[in-house]
């Protein structure tokens, strides 16, 4: 299977944002590493909060409230590395607090980075979520948007154990609390205007990443979810990517949908 950066058919420059359930951080730092290995200048950041990256994820972390201060620091730091992580401040519990979505534009306009990767949503580490009114927090400069959902929820009862904001999710999926989450329900959440791609910039290219595809039954469930999305028009995304986002990215299948129409 082709690597993820090839599947996404990346332009030389852009902004990639990650929304949805658990796995966003692993996905973001994996792609950052691959892009940097290809010689691109990469910034990873967030408009919400992320854990301080490990050295393996990002050896250089810059913290300043003003994006322009980050850019001044980056002018020196980029002499040693192609990949930087930036945040506005250190938060509690070992997390970094990010920038307002409109501040990401300063990084774009600087021209210092080829790719800016942004974690633009929070899910309290649960595999599936529905966005609240203030979520997600997607920069308008986003050119590629990836919505992540975990396959381990399929067949499980709807509840906060696995689904962040489960009451909202139930409304979008058409499920009652503790009702079993089906592939059809997952597809409804992904495709709903208030679901996975809520607030997506109109011109952004959209992809679904179905995570935790580590067993044959989960991969079969992923194929059924993709089939449900294929039957819906307009299509929610260009493609459904089925894989695992942990200790590197494994891709098992890519289901082309055709993109929003």
Image (cartoon, rainbow, N blue to C red):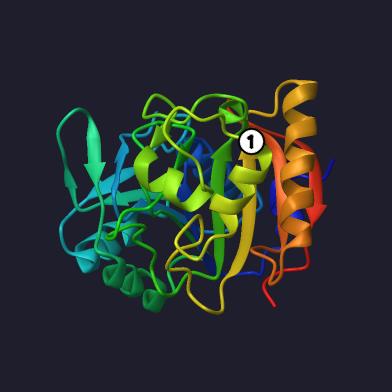
Who is closer to the viewer here, 24 or 190?
Answer: 190
- Residue closest to the far top: 215
Residue furthest to the right: 1
Q: Residue at x 41, y 74 (%)?
A: 140
Residue 164 position within the rendered picture, expressed as x and y whole percent measured from the top left: 37, 37
- Locate residue 159, reporting x and y percent: 40, 29
Return the residue nearer the eye: 38 or 240.
240
Circle 1 — which element? loop
Report which quarter residue 223 is drawn in.
Answer: top right
Q: Is residue 93 left or right of residue 242?
A: left
Q: Measured from the top left, where is residue 221 in percent x and y?
A: 74, 34
76 horizontally vs 193: left or right: left
Q: Which residue is mark 1?
A: 182
Using the rendered image of the protein, determine whether residue 59 is visible from the camera's viewpoint: yes
Any part of residue 165 in sight? no
Image spot of residue 202 (x, y percent)? 52, 78
Residue at x-position 56% and y-position 29%: 180
């Amino acid at each position: 299977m082709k690597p993820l950066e090839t599947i996404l058919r990346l332009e030389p420059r852009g902004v990639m944002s990650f929304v949805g359930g658990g796995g966003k951080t692993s996905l973001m730092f994996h792609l950052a590493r691959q892009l940097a290995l290809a010689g691109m200048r990469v910034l990873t950041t967030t408009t919400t909060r992320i854990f301080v990256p490990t050295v393996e994820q990002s050896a250089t972390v810059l913290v300043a409230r003003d994006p322009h201060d980050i850019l001044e620091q980056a002018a020196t730091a980029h002499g040693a590395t192609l990949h930087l992580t930036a945040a506005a401040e250190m938060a509690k519990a070992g997390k970094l607090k990010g920038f307002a979505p409109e501040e990401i534009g300063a990084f774009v306009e600087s021209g210092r980075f080829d790719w800016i990767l942004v974690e633009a949503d929070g899910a309290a580490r649960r595999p599936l979520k529905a966005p609240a009114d203030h979520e997600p927090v997607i920069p308008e400069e986003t050119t590629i948007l990836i919505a992540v959902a975990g396959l381990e929820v399929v067949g499980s009862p709807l509840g906060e154990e696995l689904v962040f904001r489960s009451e909202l999710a139930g409304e979008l999926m058409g499920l009652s609390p503790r009702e079993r989450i089906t592939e059809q329900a997952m597809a409804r959440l992904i495709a709903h205007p208030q679901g996975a791609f809520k607030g997506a910039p109109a011109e952004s290219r959209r992809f679904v990443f179905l995570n935790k595809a580590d067993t044959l039954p989960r991969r079969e469930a992923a194929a059924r979810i993709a089939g449900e999305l294929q039957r819906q028009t307009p299509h929610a995304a260009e493609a459904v990517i089925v894989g695992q986002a942990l200790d590197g990215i494994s891709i098992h299948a890519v289901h082309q949908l055709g993109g929003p129409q």
